[in-house]
Image (spheres, rainbow, N blue to C red):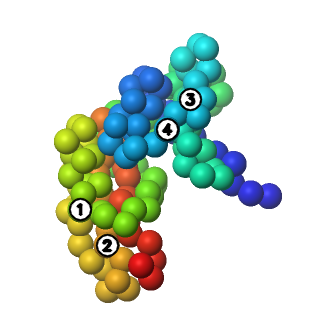
Amino acid sequence: MKLGYLITYVPDVRASLDFFSTAFGLDVRFVHESGTYGELETGETALAFAADELAEQNFHGGHVSAHASIKPLGMEVALVTDDVPAAHAKALQAGATEIAQPVRKPWGQVVSYVRCPDGILVELCSPIGG
């Protein structure tokens, strides 16, 4: 078994794809003609977005939408970069909200956190050991 996709449910798939492309430089891999599903190119595992309306069809008990939650959900998308401060600044310029400024952790990794307009929490981090 392997991780194939990380799918987040969002109110506007195209807006999430556009934000992640602008803020983090990720290319769009695929968008369904309905506009209710799309993927970004991130390597072997795709970062994907599905419309909240699909969640309603899939989860009859409902779901917690990241954009509707006052606090970030208890999960994050981690993006690895050699220049965390520059990536952090670019994300803020694109419309993200700062959660934590870049700091060097005791193990040497530089880490910051931003929250995207669709509510997704993103960790920006340097490579471990890099």
- The residues bearing labels 1 and 4 have C-alpha atoms spaced at a distance of 21 Å
Instruction: Say which amino acid is labelled 1.
Output: Pro
Residue highlighted by disc 2:
110
Please state the horizontal and vertical placement of residue 67, each as a whole percent of the image. 35, 34
Lower sequence index among marks 4 and 3: 4
Please state the horizontal and vertical placement of residue 62, each as a whole percent of the image. 54, 30
Q: Which mark is residue 120?
A: none
Horizontal side of residue 17 vs 119, given as left or right: right
Looking at the rendered structure, the secondary structure element under dot 1 is helix
Lower sequence index among marks 2 and 1: 1
Instruction: Say which amino acid is labelled 3.
Output: Gly
Question: Do the residues under discs 4 and 3 have CB atoms within 8 angstroms?
Answer: no
Lower sequence index among marks 3 and 1: 3
Q: Residue lying furthest right in this view?
A: 1
Of 117 and 89, nearer the camera is 89
Looking at the rendered structure, the secondary structure element under dot 3 is strand
- The residues bearing labels 2 and 4 have C-alpha atoms spaced at a distance of 24 Å
| Image height of 106 relative to 77, above or below | below
Residue highlighted by disc 4:
27
Instruction: Say which amino acid is labelled 2.
Output: Val
Lower sequence index among marks 3 and 2: 3
Lower sequence index among marks 1 and 4: 4
Residue drawn where x is 52% and y is 24% of the image: 51
Q: Which mark is residue 38?
A: 3
